[in-house]
């Protein structure tokens, strides 16, 4: 009786249920199968195994953690039960799939999946044992002293991540240090066993001897004075040589991150500072891109054969004017009406761009081809490593402007308006011009990104300007931390760079993107690197509660 | 002061010119079309019926947006996925097996009820799960946070269901009893269209009764009015919010069923565009208002069906049907400029979140 | 703490810069005399080719099907000059930016000999540029846009394709409708995709050239489901309801148009036609009972005989399905073209290979009378290699059956 009470059956059952659901899900949607032959450590274990054993370990770990200190052995029993329970569920899945035709409904429950789940057909008992093992492992981990546990987790996580990114890392190692180095560490897109162990031990030891026990949230504070100067110089130097280190593919990814960062900076002014929810931000990106294309293209649709540098300010101006014009009808709309109307504008621009109506001017579905790259003297900036510097300059200018604008009087007006329009108006702020200015500047940034995008791509098609871009930019500024410039950069790296590096996940990138958005918002509602004001706002409630 | 007045006038002037231009284009197009009249009476009736049928589906989905907005003031971006999940799962797991067994053809009515029921159940389950995991913890966070989790949930469910049932569109089985059409005025109305319009009407009446006259319905209204006061009155706010989501999702489940009957194919991405359209419909009608959702849905359906032919055809625009979404969104802007609260929305001062 | 942090960063930067400048240069057994560089394949190492096909998103089947074709070609070929062949499969995302990223990823790997791709013409434009600049050869199994082999538009040196130009398919369908079916009025619908728009236009031009009249030329949007209003306005065209309705769009919209046109007043007797975007088992299933009276144009594989039979059998065993789409055979041929040129131009020494990139390109452009399963391939100077044979199919009992020519 007391054992039953102590086991806290309801909570344990809940954990079993969730772990089972997650394990069933990753199996049934095909993730396990996709990674069945994807080794993290060559010949030892695969991504698939991480995926279907992981959830059990995590929930067993949490079950033990929640058990009172004095009864840790009971916790292990819980972990064992969870492992056993999930194992039984998965055994049932294996049995079902072998006896009735579930594949006609759930297309991904294939013989191959069953083969992976049962460790190459060695039977469902192996599956059960592995699950119990995973549960126990998770449980035991919870009993390990905190300091060691943190070290083990960081070490293990880093090793798995390295294994996951081996393809890209191997390519980098090969071109930086030669094929021998690369082949010694990585083999067929995975870590070799010995380097994996070395990496794991090194990282674990490093963290163990460095850490103070628990991970503190990163506290980024710029040092002052001379150190600040040195740091700035170092960062600038680093940014200047970055493409050499990254190679052309990773630089290409960096360039994409840069363009989204640029758009994020602009949208940050509109949403983060002025509080105007804009879901059609892609419209200005498209306008910038099409202006660049029309002005510079050497094809039949080119109007002026301008050079990139001459056309660039025109593109920004055109996008800004478009922002001004589209801003006017929505001036009196608030909140969510604004969201749907801007979304509508974005769609209108996209549909017009691909329509037969506009085809004689901007190419319709066939887009505009033959957009030249920027020229520096006689050099055409073809390679991503060269384009990188154009984007770097664009980003630097935009960052500088963002900071200046935010700290100017206009910035304060925007923030006042975001907090309360009525009060702001009563304080003598002209809402009309303040809002229009936000729209105009935001659109200009987006136009700049669009113009560079067109030149970088060399040809543009209306399909590149869909709603997903607006959604992605909005997500990245909020995930990064609304109103915060470093936050926007981190958001762009996470939401643009990471999906690119995890190309292997194929369709599941979007699933992971969804999970990431939800978990980020739940765990850090103020964003990754929140701006000071937003952080204060969000936590003012807590403080009040604590005080009261 | 004078300075501000001058600016306002200048912007007003621009807006009036813009409005006049849009209205002028519409009027010229309409008049020219009516003079040339390339269509027969039967064609016009067809356009209207297609529009009403499409609009009915938008209306049912829009209810979900409007209910949630009324209660939480949040845009539930994942609502299109509630719509998709129900019918996609029930087609793959219920309708197809029933059809293979021959039961669907021999007993269409119980089969259809079963499919509808499973569609509703899955939609409701998905909505409750989403609310519990992605929205409830953020109830007191700034409004943009739940918008982002909603977008995240939307991606998640799309690709989750894609994983479960595949990326291919699944054909919804044809039901012989629903094939063919019935004569009406000068035209023939397809049987699925009749079913759509009839079911939507019944469901809307039932929903209206539920919201206005039952205890849970009143609780929803009370929570929409003021959560704190409702809580003081002994209403369980969390449960009522879950109920709101469930009601909206049930409507989406029904809409999914009707969609499958009319269009005969379902796939994982089918919720995205109807979701955005229904959101537009909800705003068009006046977000937060149930009759608004119905009216907005119908208007949007009619604009899409009639608009290209009525407004654009005679203006010599090539491939004018391509621009139907341009018309829909332009009408939205036009309506919102004239009536910022939507067609039937009340002129309320917006609540502060 | 912060000083140590700075020092750490400084060391890191310095180290990486040194590495960036110093690394790389592996010693070589060969001397490369090729104008645009060489690929060296060490003894025992595989010959690596890359594919850039759409393997995610709504057009996955199109690209996956081609990728299967490449994989089977590699399997059938076995070893090339004593080296195995390895495929590096990338995703072109069916978009210009997807093509660009995939292209950059591929050309950052100097061990890759050639590229099979892209699936979508929109992705092909930037990829052709990147590959051309980096000295790679690209053979696309499924780009059909005329602009890609037009030197005034998007063609770049090093780009070739085994897929037929849209103009060929549009003309074939027009010929079939006008001459074989004897239909003299037609309408065409595209969906704003570059491929469908190009094909619909090609059809319009060819049909009018035959002497027919195109009474309506319009478009729907990707993701549309209610096609009845569009179809009603086509039925009420000034030139009367068309006798032939051509909609070369992709599966879902194609099925909607195919089924709904039967329900629209005035189009009951209109003959319907679609193209290879609607040519898949999935499409046949969705169209279902609306199939009679509908024709599909696509590549003609009927004459290829024995190899194709073997190919189809291998496809079934390896991937557990019938071919997903239409360009698997073109991908098979493209891969074989590349591998046979590798055999011709590679210099051998001690089991290692040296492949000159310009030599490889020259060899590909010189392809003539190459016996593939899509026909006898001969490349012109701008890389159009297809022996364009278009057949017209109809669905009989769920299968596509060739009925013309």
Image (cartoon, rainbow, N blue to C red):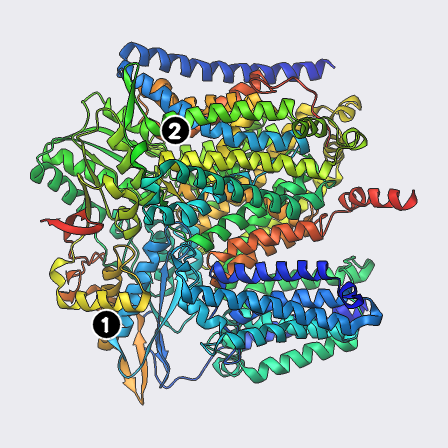
Looking at the picture, tell me which residue is in the foreground, C68 or A303: C68
Tell me, yes or no, whether the two marked residues, 1 and 2, touch with CB atoms within 8 Å.
Answer: no
Q: Which residue corresponds to mark 2?
A: B323
- In the picture, residue B288 is in which quadrant? top right
Q: What residue appears at the point 81 percent right and 61 percent down from the top-left corner?
A: A226
Residues marked 1 and 2, same chain: no
Q: From this view, report whether residue B9 is shown above or below residue B176.
A: above
Q: CA distance from mark 1 to mark 2?
A: 48 Å
Of labels 1 and 2, the one closer to you? 2
Looking at the picture, tell me which residue is in the foreground, A176 or C140: C140
Q: What residue appears at the point 30 percent right and 44 percent down from the top-left corner?
A: C286
* Rendered location of residue C353, percent (x, y): 31, 82
Q: Which residue corresponds to mark 1?
A: C341
Looking at the picture, tell me which residue is in the foreground, B133 or C127: B133
* Rendered location of residue B349, percent (x, y): 70, 21
Q: From this view, report whether residue A107 is shown above or below residue A537.
A: below
Residue A255 in the figure: left or right of residue A151? left
Count the numbered circles shown: 2
**Residue A92 disc label:** none
Residue B311 visible in rendering: yes
Q: What residue appears at the point 68 percent right and 80 percent down from the top-left corner?
A: A202
Residue C349 in the figure: left or right of residue A477? left
Q: Residues within 10 Å of mark 2 (few under 14, many from 20)?
A: many
Q: Which residue appears farthest toward the right when viewing the image?
A: A548
Q: From this view, report whether residue A389 is shown above or below residue C27.
A: above
Which quadrant is home to the N terminus of chain C? bottom right
- In the picture, residue B242 is in which quadrant? top right
Q: What residue appears at the point 30 percent right and 14 percent down from the top-left corner?
A: B185
* Rendered location of residue C106, percent (x, y): 41, 65
Secondary element at tag 2: helix
């Amino acid at each position: 009786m007391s054992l039953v009470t102590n086991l806290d059956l309801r909570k344990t059952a809940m954990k079993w249920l969730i772990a089972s659901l997650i394990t069933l899900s990753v199996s049934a949607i095909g993730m396990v199968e996709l990674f069945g032959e994807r080794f993290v450590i060559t010949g030892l274990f695969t991504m698939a195994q991480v995926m279907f054993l992981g959830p059990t370990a995590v929930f067993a770990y949490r079950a033990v953690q929640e058990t009172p200190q004095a009864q840790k052995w009971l916790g292990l029993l819980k972990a064992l039960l969870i492992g056993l329970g999930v194992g039984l569920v998965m055994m049932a899945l294996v049995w079902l799939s072998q006896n009735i035709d579930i594949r006609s409904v759930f297309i991904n429950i294939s013989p191959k999946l069953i083969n992976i789940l049962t460790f190459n057909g060695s039977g469902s008992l192996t599956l059960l044992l592995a699950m119990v093992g995973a549960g126990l492992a998770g449980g035991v981990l919870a009993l390990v002293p905190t300091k060691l546990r943190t070290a083990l987790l960081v070490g293990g996580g880093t090793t798995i991540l390295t294994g996951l990114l081996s393809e890209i890392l191997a390519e980098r190692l090969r071109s930086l240090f030669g094929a021998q180095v690369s082949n010694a560490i990585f083999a067929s897109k995975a870590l070799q066993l010995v380097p994996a162990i070395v990496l794991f031990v090194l990282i674990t030891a490093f963290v163990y001897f460095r850490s103070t026990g628990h991970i503190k949230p990163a506290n980024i504070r710029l040092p002052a004075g001379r150190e600040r100067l040195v740091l700035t110089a170092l960062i600038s130097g680093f940014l200047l040589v970055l493409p050499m280190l990254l190679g052309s593919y990773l630089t290409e990814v960096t360039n994409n991150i840069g363009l989204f960062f640029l758009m994020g900076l602009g949208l940050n002014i509109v949403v983060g500072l002025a509080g105007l929810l804009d879901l059609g931000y892609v419209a200005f990106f498209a306008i910038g891109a099409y202006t660049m294309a029309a002005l510079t293209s050497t094809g039949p649709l080119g109007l002026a054969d301008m050079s990139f540098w001459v056309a660039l300010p025109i593109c920004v101006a055109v996008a800004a004017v478009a922002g001004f014009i589209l801003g006017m009808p929505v001036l009196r709309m608030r909140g969510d009406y604004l969201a749907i109307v801007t979304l509508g504008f974005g769609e209108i621009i996209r549909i017009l761009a691909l329509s037969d109506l506009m085809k004689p001017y901007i190419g319709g579905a066939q887009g505009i081809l033959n957009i030249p790259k920027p020229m520096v003297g006689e050099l055409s900036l073809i390679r991503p490593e060269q384009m990188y510097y154009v984007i770097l300059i664009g980003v630097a200018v935009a960052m500088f402007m963002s900071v200046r604008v935010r700290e100017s009087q206009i910035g304060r007006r925007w923030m006042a308006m975001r907090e309360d329009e009525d009060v702001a108006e009563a304080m003598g702020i002209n809402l009309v011009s303040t809002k229009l200015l936000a729209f105009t500047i935001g659109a200009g940034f987006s136009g700049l990104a669009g113009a560079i995008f067109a030149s970088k791509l060399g040809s543009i098609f209306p399909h590149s300007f869909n709603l997903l871009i607006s959604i992605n930019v909005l997500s990245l500024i909020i995930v990064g931390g609304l109103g915060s410039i470093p936050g926007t950069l981190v958001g762009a790296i996470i939401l643009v760079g990471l999906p690119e590096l995890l190309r292997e996940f194929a369709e599941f990138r979007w699933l992971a993107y969804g999970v990431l958005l939800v978990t980020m918002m739940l765990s850090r509602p103020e964003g990754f690197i929140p701006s000071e004001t937003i952080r204060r706002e969000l936590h003012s409630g807590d403080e009040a509660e604590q005080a009261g | 002061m004078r300075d501000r007045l001058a600016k306002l006038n200048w912007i007003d002037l621009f807006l009036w010119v813009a409005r006049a231009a849009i209205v002028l284009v519409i009027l010229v197009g309409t008049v020219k079309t009516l003079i040339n009249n390339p269509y027969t009476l039967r064609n016009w009736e067809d356009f209207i019926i297609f529009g009403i049928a499409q609009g009915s589906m938008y209306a049912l989905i829009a209810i979900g947006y409007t209910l949630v907005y009324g209660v939480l003031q949040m845009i539930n971006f994942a609502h299109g996925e509630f719509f998709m999940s129900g019918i996609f799962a029930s087609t793959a797991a219920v309708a197809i097996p029933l059809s293979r067994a021959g039961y669907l053809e021999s007993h269409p009515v119980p089969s259809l009820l079963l499919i509808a029921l499973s569609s509703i159940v899955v939609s409701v389950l998905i909505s409750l799960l989403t609310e519990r995991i992605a929205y409830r913890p953020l109830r007191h966070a700034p409004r943009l946070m739940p918008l982002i989790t909603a977008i995240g949930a939307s991606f998640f469910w799309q690709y989750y269901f894609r994983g479960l049932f595949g990326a291919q569109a699944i054909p919804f089985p044809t039901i012989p009893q629903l094939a063919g059409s019935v004569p009406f005025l000068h035209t023939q109305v397809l049987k699925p269209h009749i079913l759509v319009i009839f079911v939507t009407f019944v469901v809307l009446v039932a929903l209206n009764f539920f919201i206005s006259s039952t205890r849970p319905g009143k609780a929803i209204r009370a929570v929409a009015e003021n959560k704190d006061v409702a809580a003081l009155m002994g209403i369980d706010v969390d449960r009522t919010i879950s109920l709101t989501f469930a009601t909206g999702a049930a409507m989406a489940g029904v809409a999914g069923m009707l969609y499958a009957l009319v269009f005969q194919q379902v796939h994982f991405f089918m919720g995205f565009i109807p979701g955005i359209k229904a959101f537009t419909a909800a705003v068009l009608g006046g977000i937060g208002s149930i009759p608004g959702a119905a009216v907005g849905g119908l208007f949007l359906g009619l604009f899409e069906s009639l608009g290209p032919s009525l407004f654009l055809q005679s203006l010599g625009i090539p491939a004018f049907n391509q621009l139907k979404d341009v018309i829909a969104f332009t009408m939205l802007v036009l309506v919102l400029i004239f009536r910022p609260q939507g067609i039937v929305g009340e002129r309320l001062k917006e609540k502060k979140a | 703490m912060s000083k140590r942090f700075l020092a750490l960063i400084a060391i890191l930067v310095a180290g990486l810069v040194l590495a960036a400048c110093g690394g790389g240069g592996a010693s070589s057994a060969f001397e490369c005399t090729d104008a645009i560089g060489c690929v060296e394949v060490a003894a025992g190492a595989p010959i690596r080719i890359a594919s850039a096909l759409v393997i995610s998103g709504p057009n996955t089947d199109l690209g996956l099907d081609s990728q299967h074709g490449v994989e089977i070609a590699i399997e059938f070929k076995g070893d090339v000059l004593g080296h195995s062949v390895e495929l590096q499969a990338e995703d072109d995302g069916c978009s210009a930016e997807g093509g660009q990223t995939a292209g950059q990823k591929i050309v950052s790997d100097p061990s890759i000999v050639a590229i099979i791709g892209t699936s979508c013409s929109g992705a092909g434009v930037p990829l052709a540029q990147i590959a051309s600049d980096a000295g790679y050869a690209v053979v696309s199994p499924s780009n059909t846009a005329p602009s890609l082999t037009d030197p005034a538009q998007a063609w770049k040196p090093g780009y070739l394709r085994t897929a037929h130009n849209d103009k060929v398919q549009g003309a074939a369908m027009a010929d079939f409708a006008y001459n074989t079916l004897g239909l003299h009025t037609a309408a065409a619908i595209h969906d704003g995709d570059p491929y469908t728009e190009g094909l619909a236009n090609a059809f319009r031009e060819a049909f009018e050239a035959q002497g027919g009249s195109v009474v309506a030329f319009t478009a729907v949007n990707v993701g549309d489901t209610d096609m009845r209003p569009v179809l009603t306005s086509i039925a009420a065209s000034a030139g009367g309801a068309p006798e032939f309705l051509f909609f070369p769009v992709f599966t879902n919209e194609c099925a909607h148009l195919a089924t709904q046109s039967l329900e629209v007043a005035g189009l009951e007797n209109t003959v319907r036609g679609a193209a290879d975007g609607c040519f898949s088992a999935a499409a046949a299933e969705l169209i279902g009972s609306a199939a009679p009276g509908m024709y599909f144009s696509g590549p003609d594989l009927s004459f290829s005989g024995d190899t194709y039979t073997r190919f189809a059998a291998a496809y079934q065993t390896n991937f557990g399905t019938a071919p997903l789409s239409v360009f698997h055979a073109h991908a098979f041929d493209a891969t074989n073209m590349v591998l046979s040129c590798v055999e011709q131009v590679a210099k051998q020494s001690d089991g290692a290979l040296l492949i000159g990139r310009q030599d490889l390109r020259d060899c590909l452009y010189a392809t003539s009378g190459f016996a593939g399963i899509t026909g006898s391939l001969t490349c012109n100077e701008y890389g159009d290699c297809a022996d364009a044979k278009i057949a017209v199919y109809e669905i009989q009992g769920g299968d596509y059956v060739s009925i013309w020519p």
